[in-house]
Amino acid sequence: MKIISLNAYMGHVFDPLMEFFEKHQDTTDIFCLQEMMSSTDENLVHEEGKRRLNILQEISRRLPDFEVVFAPAQDDYEIDSPYPGQSQLGTAIFYRRTLDVKETGSFFIYNEFNSFVPPDWETLGHNMVFMVLRINGKELVVSTLHGNSQPSDKLDSPKRLAQFQKVLDFLLGRDELKILMGDFNALPETEGVKMFEKAGLNNLIDEYEITTTRGSHMRKLFPEYKNSTYGFQEFADYTFLSPEIKVTSFEVPDEPISDHLPMILEIEI
């Protein structure tokens, strides 16, 4: 089974991102995606390098053999858009229709639906999406999250730790084998990340000695980060899983498709 996680950066890097999905659609079973925008308006006109309000629909068209679970966090996140009231921001899982799916769902790990009060990013809601599937007589819960980005130092804070505790409470309350992938918005040395390791989950970013989950394209998109307070923060994304799951491949290739890199996981159960 192959699973890919990616912060899609709301489709800013549109054409390379679409090529990425087309390249991987035949070999991938599950895509876990953060920073997704959804709009059913087919008449939207987009500018190059801007957010795509219907990036969810654009990806759906390129994944005809997949179902999608989309969990919106905010209506009309695009407050500066010429299309007010026509889009949602959220988190999504695309999964192949041939999978034996037992359950899907979502819940908020930080704030709540439509809690955003611009421009205060700390008020934005953040959620987690999950699915439970049967494979070779075993059950597996695959989940993805987009963590709160504040404070922007990506270090521990009471709210950030409480957010991760909600995630752990959910996972540890389930009997299935577990995979968690996503944009945590936290640095590797934080207690927030170590919480998952202490809970017995394997941290593949650490085990495979990944040196960045943000990549070279982030530097091209945001050259100003070099001289900013926190510089180029190399880590935000993580993959955790139950030690009983056999990993056959894990990579974080430097693909110019977002301001984050994709995490590509292959497993045997």
Image: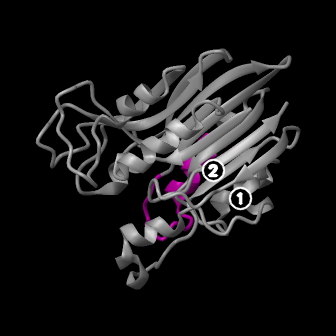
Residue that sits furthest to the left in the current view: 82
Determine which quarter of the picture holds residue 266.
top right
Q: Nearer the viewer, residue 192 or 181?
A: 181
* Left or right: 9, with 3 as reference point: left
Q: Amino acid at mark 1?
A: Ile
10 Å neighbourhood of mark 2: few (<14), some, or many (≥20)? many
Magenta stretch containing residue 167, yes or no? yes
10 Å neighbourhood of mark 1: few (<14), some, or many (≥20)? many
Q: In which quadrant is the C terminus drawn? A: top right
Going 67% across and 23% down the picture, which residue do you hit? Answer: 132
The magenta segment: 148-168
Contact between marks 1 and 2 (CB within 8 A): the answer is yes
Q: In which quadrant is the N terminus drawn? A: top right
Which residue is disc 1 drawn over? 205
Which residue is disc 2 drawn over? 263
Determine which quarter of the picture holds residue 97.
top right
Q: x, y percentage for residue 144?
A: 58, 39
Q: Is residue 110 visible?
A: no
Going 66% across and 37% down the picture, which residue do you hit? Answer: 3
Q: Is residue 174 above or below residue 119?
A: above
Q: Is residue 84 above or below residue 225?
A: above
Residue 82's disc number? none
Mark before the other along the chain sequence, 1 or 2: 1
SS class of the residue under badge 1?
helix
Q: x, y percentage for residue 208?
A: 78, 60
Q: Is residue 199 above or below residue 177?
A: below
Q: CA distance from mark 1 to mark 2?
A: 9 Å
Magenta stretch containing residue 79, yes or no? no
* Left or right: 224, with 250 as reference point: left
Q: Amino acid at mark 2?
A: Met
Q: x, y percentage for residue 107?
A: 51, 31
